[in-house]
Image (cartoon, helix red, strand yellow):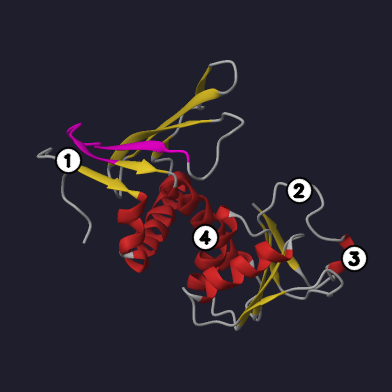
Amino acid sequence: MIPEGRGGLPWLILTDADLERDLDRTLGLVLAGVKDALLSHAEGQIEVPPRFAVDAGPGRLVSTVGVERTRTKAMGFRVYETFPSSSHEHGQIVAVFDAEDGQLLGLVLGNLLGALRTAALNAVALEQLARKDACTLGVLGTGFQARWHALFALRVRPFARVFVYSRKPENRAAFVRWLSARSDRPVDEAQAQRRWRMKLTCCSRSRAPAPPSSTSPGCCRART
């Protein structure tokens, strides 16, 4: 159950734990919301000004704001920081308002929602653009963001199996355990010398996350 308020407050206040409690429902809602947002953007019904930031010296506090006028009829803002020590354990704030009467609907505290949104956007692109006969998903990178990209990809396409590669074997093993616990698809570690013919998602900040020779002409690549 997603809570309907905390501490007597009349608004929803959700955390990462709330989003993960009913993960299948959360993933479905995020994916549907992203698709609605893309359709509204194509129709000119979304307004998203450039992001705004204040410089604190060691890092910045960044704010984004937007409104969707036709489907969800919602508006809101997101605030996050970019300090060098920032990680997926650092929190963000998302506030959602009703775009018709201005009422505050709720807050989302944590870092998971941003990762889910990014992964869902990539999943929509994958669903529409990847080859229809693609049966294997390849993931470059094993960090926090990579996990959600893989999970969303499996939601929009019936990949038969997943291969993951990163430079550290212990990170690959941890990724395999995490995804295997949340998916019924086989998940295996890929070797650097393997030639990949698959839908390939890159979730790494490295400029060279895998040897260029490891991808073949039939490999579809998406950098995130």
Task: Give SS at disc 1.
Answer: loop
For the record, the magenta segment spans 90-107
Q: Amino acid type of disc 2?
A: Ser
Q: From the viewer's perspective, is residue 173 above or below residue 97?
A: below
Question: Is there CB contact under 8 Å for labels 1 and 3?
Answer: no
Q: Which residue is mark 1?
A: 11
Apparent side of residue 149 relative to residue 78 in the rendered image (left or right): right
Chief secondary structure of the magenta portion: strand
What is the CA distance from the residue labelled 1 to the residue labelled 3?
53 Å
| Kind of residue at badge 3 | Ser
C-alpha separation, residue under disc 3 versus residue under disc 2: 16 Å
Membership of 208 in magenta stretch: no
**Numbered disc 2: secondary structure:** loop
Quarter of image, res 187: bottom right
Q: Gap between marks 1 and 2, in whole Å?
A: 41 Å
**Residue at 30% from the left image edge and 50% from the top image edge:** 71
- Which numbered disc covers residue 148? 4
At 20% from the left and 31% from the top, the residue drawn is: 102
Crowd around label 4: few <14 · some 14–19 · many ≥20 (10 Å): many
The x and y percentages for residue 174 are 60, 66
* Residue 138 position within the rendered picture, expressed as x and y whole percent measured from the top left: 68, 70
User: Sequence order check: which comes first, mark 1 or mark 2?
Assistant: 1
Residue ID at (49%, 77%):
183
- Identify which amino acid the numbered label 1 is placed on: Trp
Relative placement, left or right, of 214 versus 198 is right
Residue of label 2 = 206
Mark with earlier residue (4, 1)? 1
Which of the marked residues, 3 or 4, is nearer the chain's N terminus?
4
